[in-house]
Amino acid sequence: MLVAAAVCPCPPLLVPDVAAGAAPELDPLRAACADALGVLAAARPDLLVVVGPAGLAGRGPHPEGATGDFREFGVDLGVRLGRDLGSTAERPLAPSLAVGAWLLADAGWDGAPVEALGVGEPLETARCVAEGRALAARADRVALLVMGDGSACRTLKAPGYLDERAAGFDAAAARALAAADPDALMALDETLAYELKAAGRAPWQLLAGAAQGARPVGRLLYDDAPYGVGYLVAAWS
């Protein structure tokens, strides 16, 4: 059963070594993520699963001890998912999951075992919901760290250029996360999300599936669009 969730964006710039001189610009976002992770720790789960968007190579489950790095972003920095179990995972963590692993390490996570699940951005809503239900059934007390960005089309300089629909899409997602409303998350349009480059849509809808029947309480901790990308942080408990 789902007992807690933290929703965080997944730009590699969250990692100060990657952001370099621009790191202070995202300090408020990092602080909000740290607060959300505090909710996970307080819930004392039996299992924590990091969920995030992934390309073909990074999709599917990753065991505790899996590793990733930020070399493709020009930084020789590696991360590990949870504890070092002395085994080498076959596949590296997708960038979104590597950011999640960094957040956990930065927070000093020493609680439940940690696994990860890379989710394909085009995964349809029904399958996201089904995956979420399956995750929630993995243990008596399951927590999720859900990584994913909103639209990438909020300004002219955004990665996806300006799209007038982007602000409305992000606002709907923010309302759903603030209210811990699974139905509202499931109602997010997957085609529109794809057009707006909103990589968080599938992970958010997986969270919606995991939360069905749990009646969580939500708090929105951050809602802004630096660099023209919608970043949302929320905590469900």
Image (spheres, rainbow, N blue to C red):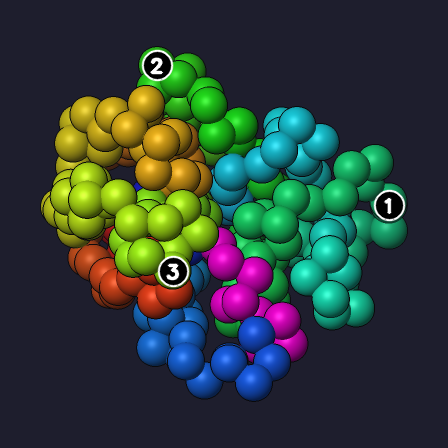
The crowd level at tag 2 (other Cα within 10 Å; few <14, some 14-19, many 20+) is few
> Residue 35: where, in percent of width, then height?
34, 69
Q: Residue at x 67, y 35 (%)?
A: 58
**Is residue 121 shown above or below 152?**
above
Which of the labelled discs sits on residue 116, or is there none?
Answer: none
Q: CA distance from mark 2 to mark 1?
A: 34 Å
Which residues make up the magenta segment? 10-18
Residue type highlighted by circle 1: Ser
Q: Which residue is mark 2?
A: 126
Q: Residue at x 78, y 37 (%)?
A: 91
- Which callout, 1 or 3, points at the residue further toward the start of the chain? 1
Q: Which residue is mark 3?
A: 157
- Which callout, 2 or 3, points at the residue further toward the start of the chain? 2
Viewer-side residue, 131 vs 121: 121
Q: Which residue is mark 1?
A: 87
Viewer-side residue, 209 vs 71: 71
**Is residue 152 shown above or below 70?**
above
